[in-house]
Amino acid sequence: MTNQNNGVEMEEQVIDLRSYLKVLRKRRLLIAMVTLLAVVTSGVLSFFILPPVYEAKSVLLVTQAADKQQAVTQKDDLNSVVSAVSRIPLLTMNTYVGQVKSEVLMQRVIDKLRLEERSYTTPSLSKQIKATAAKDSNLIEVTVSNSDSRLAADIANTLSREFLELISEKNQEQMERSVKFMKDQNGATEKDLEKASEELKQFDSEPRGVTYLQQELAAKSQDLNKYQSELTRAQIEFRQLNAAGSRLEETLATTPKTIAVQKYDAVQGKVMPSEEVNTAYTSLAEKLNDNKAALAEKEAQVAGTEEVLLTLKDQIDQLQAELTGKKTTQDRLMAEFTRLDDTRKLLADKTTQTQIARSIDLGSTSLVIYSPASAAVDPVKPKKKLNMAIAFILGLIASVLMAFVLEFMDNTIKTQEDVAQHLNLPVLGLIPLADIRAKK
């Protein structure tokens, strides 16, 4: 059963295909005429009506280009800031390509070639120009399309030269602004530097300056060391005298004041016992008194030295506090003077470098004409053979569609096949066409 169904379907497809071929054979004259008309129309337009378009191409080489747009970095480094102001702007390839079709450049080309006499405007000229950056390279291709091959080459070459001059002028303007800015900043910095120098000189000339206080502090420190040594020595001597006095007191305590002696009494005429002062005791007592006197003197010396030391320490503390305040002020003034002096030197150096860069930049530092344009011999448009081929295909497609549409809209019965197809009735006979001219 399945094989029978497949056979029926195949038969129906063959019948449909035959009907399609029949329609094409029936309308072959229409298809041929429409296709021929499309080809002839395309040929007439391509050969006689459409003006030829020539292309001229010049190539620019960008010697300095950034990979991406430079971002402003948040840095307070003075050298980085001044360097960013003083250098020539480094543009990306897309920026260069975008500037090629700028209105200013279009107007310069029009003025240079006097194209206003040919009714050219900046929008109309811009439509004839296409600028593209070659992939993975620093080349910019400038293509000019025009009906005049010589004029297309002139526009391309003039555009390239004017573009270089425009970039050079922009660089010159940037350098001029940078030089003026840095000169103004340098003048203001020199005034601030002069003011800072005067403040520093005035501060150094004040009485009890940093140098004087440093010398005074050094002298007081020497005195402090000297009196500290004297105090140490006096304290040692005091302890020695105190220890000696203690030994004398112990010895004196064990020494009798008097001693018993035997003396001859002339009155009685015999030797009688008696007492007399112990010379050892007297000697020890005298030494003890001398020791106490020396000890009291040494104690007074220690007390006096300690008082002098306290006074010196207070004076040194006051000197240090005064010196710290004045040294801080001096350091601040000196740091400001050094900063301004460094800024002045940096601005002077960058000004000189910018002036040198301005004098040598003629547009060729960032752009050069790699390949100038030449007049084209053959036009790029219209492409006659391609246009006629496309017209043939389109005409053929349109005529076939037209044939099927006409066949679909035709409801008349003309042949026995039409009777069998539309009325589903068998044909019993045919009435032949009569030739009227033959009867006459």
Image: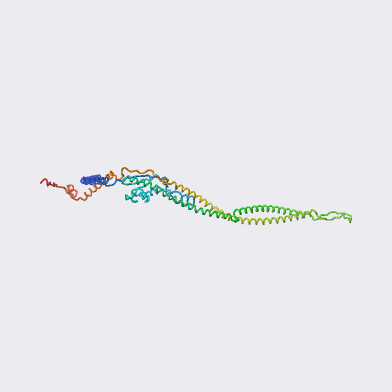
Q: Which quarter shows the N terminus?
A: top left
Residue 129: x and y in percent read 34, 48
Q: Residue furthest left?
A: 440
**How many marks are shown on the rendered structure?**
0
* Relative depth, front residue between 376 and 92: 376
Residue 424: x and y in percent read 18, 49
Residue 379: x and y in percent read 31, 44
* Relative depth, front residue between 92 and 414: 92
Q: Is residue 322 left or right of residue 303?
A: left
Q: Is residue 419 left or right of residue 320?
A: left
Report which quarter residue 330 is drawn in.
bottom right
Residue 383: x and y in percent read 29, 44
The coloring applied to the image is: rainbow
* Relative depth, front residue between 307 and 59: 59
* Relative depth, front residue between 26 and 379: 379
